[in-house]
Amino acid sequence: MGSVLAAAAPGVLAQPSGVRSAFETGNRRYAEGDYAGALRQYETVLESGWAGGALYYNVAGAHARRGHTGQAVRYYEKARRLLPEAASESERLQHNLGVVRSRTEAPPPAPPSVQATARETLTAWFPPFGYVVLGLLAHLGALAWWAGRRAAPERQQQRLRPGAGPAALLAAGLLTAGLGIWLAAPPPAGSGRTVALRGPLTLHAAPDARADSAAAVPEGTVLRLTERSDEGGGGGGWARVRSSRGDEGWAPTDALGDI
């Protein structure tokens, strides 16, 4: 983050003189420590429609110096996709991106869900497998009662009158076993933060590009990651995200940059 890329020279030299001048002025402001001034110059270049790895790298560095973590990750990710992987600039970019992410404060923990609280309470003293065994024993006990009643002489059958008890025991056994299976299942993935790398980014109602649109967020929006899926439509991974305004939906992971 302490230096700029002077240019992917052919790309800059091919631009109009005003764009070249703004880029070079932005680099000078950056070197002088005037990161706000550098960003103003770089914005002029961005507004011209020019896209380049060097430009995005420098914009990311200026944002990182000003503490704009979401914007820094956004532009570092955009630069990473344009700079050659074997270039030394790419190594610097990966280093800077790691530094930015390491400085990011962890988001405040979300309040535990009802499912998480129930899971923690029910497994505090009794393992999930224990619920399965207990449920199966209750289920087998109810079946044994019915089998014993059918095998008993008619006089004893009158004393073993059917009632709600065995039926309730049978149902309770099935429910307890099902509870154990649910408790044994892995909990959903934890949350994190990510940033929209393109915009407007459409959030879908399901992890499929053909699903209805649930919302749209501008490029650079910092989002809370709540769930991931590798089984969505479109041939790639999907993530369920939520914005600070409450917009929520699924987006392809290649349109997001983890913070």
Image: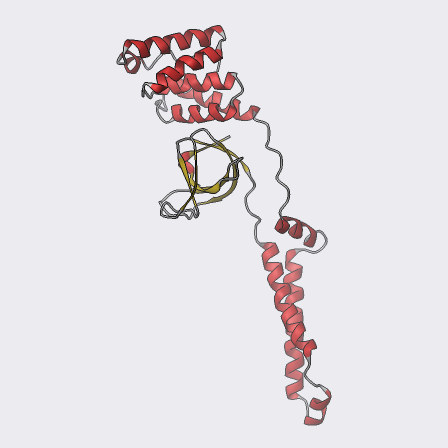
Left/right of residue 9 with respect to residue 156 in the rendered view: left
Residue located 29% across and 9% down the image: 17
**Residue name at image x 39 percent, y 23 percent:** 79
Q: How many marks?
A: 0
- Looking at the picture, tell me which residue is in the foreground, 259 or 70: 70
Vertical arrangement, residue 124 with respect to residue 9, above or below: below
Residue 232 in the image: state x and y as whole percent.
41, 47
Vertical placement of residue 154 versus 202, above or below: below
Q: Position of residue 100 (x, y in %)?
A: 52, 23
Residue 127 drawn at (x, y percent): 67, 55
The answer to which of 35 and 212 lies nearer the viewer is 212
Above or below, 48 relative to 250: above
Is residue 88 something one can see in this rendering?
Answer: no
Q: Residue at x 56, y 41 (%)?
A: 190
Residue 49 in which image quadrant: top left
Residue 231 sits above or below residue 74 on the image? below
Colour mapping used in the image: secondary structure
Horizontal side, residue 33 vs residue 160: left or right = left
In the image, 186 versus 158, the foreground residue is 158
Residue 66 place in picture, x, y as percent: 52, 17
Q: Quadrant of residue 131?
A: bottom right
Tell me, yes or no, if residue 220 can be seen here.
yes
